[in-house]
Image: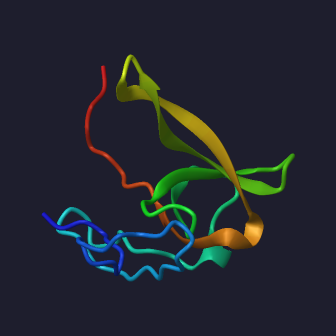
Amino acid sequence: MTIPILNIAPDTEVNPMQQIEPYNQQTELSPCLVWEKPETAPKDEVFLALFNCSPLPVLCTWNEPESQWIFSVVQVNLYQGKWNDTFFDTEYETANALVAWMPLPATNVKRK
């Protein structure tokens, strides 16, 4: 199975401020999963978003009161001498900071 990826080599150390350019790669799961242009991003849905501030795609939606994109990132704190206290932190990005977006894939999993 292949997944959509970024044009960053696996062994590359990513600088969070580095400009990254997405590219489209079809997947075996769904050939329609491709990165879309940022200006076409819906402001009434949750989707996968790519920002230069994050080396990985994030779940994102538009926050109307702030007029910014909003998403969560995983953070970690030191607890009893170990980096094991994980939590989500809310981040905001300006309207023009979105690099690319992708709709969430449909699922055929039946839920009870």
**Is 15 in front, or is 39?**
15
Residue 24 location (% of width, % of height) = 36, 81
- In this rendering, is residue 80 above or below 73? above
Give left or right: position of 53 versus 95.
left
Query: For the point 52% across and 55% down, which residue is it?
Result: 47
Residue 1 in sight here? yes
Horizontally, residue 7 falls left or right of residue 72, namely: left
Residue 108 versus residue 60 in the image, above or below: above
Q: Can you tell which quarter of the image residue 30 is in?
A: bottom left
Residue sitting nearer the eye, 104 or 99: 99
Q: Residue at x 59, y 37 (%)?
A: 89
Q: Position of residue 44 (x, y in %)?
A: 68, 52
Out of 112 and 17, give the one closest to the viewer.
17
Q: Percent from the top left, x then y, of residue 29?
A: 20, 62
Q: Nearer the viewer, residue 74 or 31?
A: 74
Q: Is residue 23 above or below residue 95?
A: below
Q: Residue furthest right?
A: 65
Image color mode = rainbow
Q: Residue furthest left?
A: 1
Q: Residue at x 38, y 16 (%)?
A: 80
Total number of numbered discs in the rendering: 0
Image quadrant containing the C terminus: top left
The residue drawn where x is 57% and y is 64% is 53
Point out residue 72 in the picture as x, y percentages from the top left corner.
56, 43
In the figure, is residue 35 to the left or right of 25?
Answer: right
The quadrant of the rendering that contains the N terminus is bottom left
Q: Is residue 45 visible?
A: no
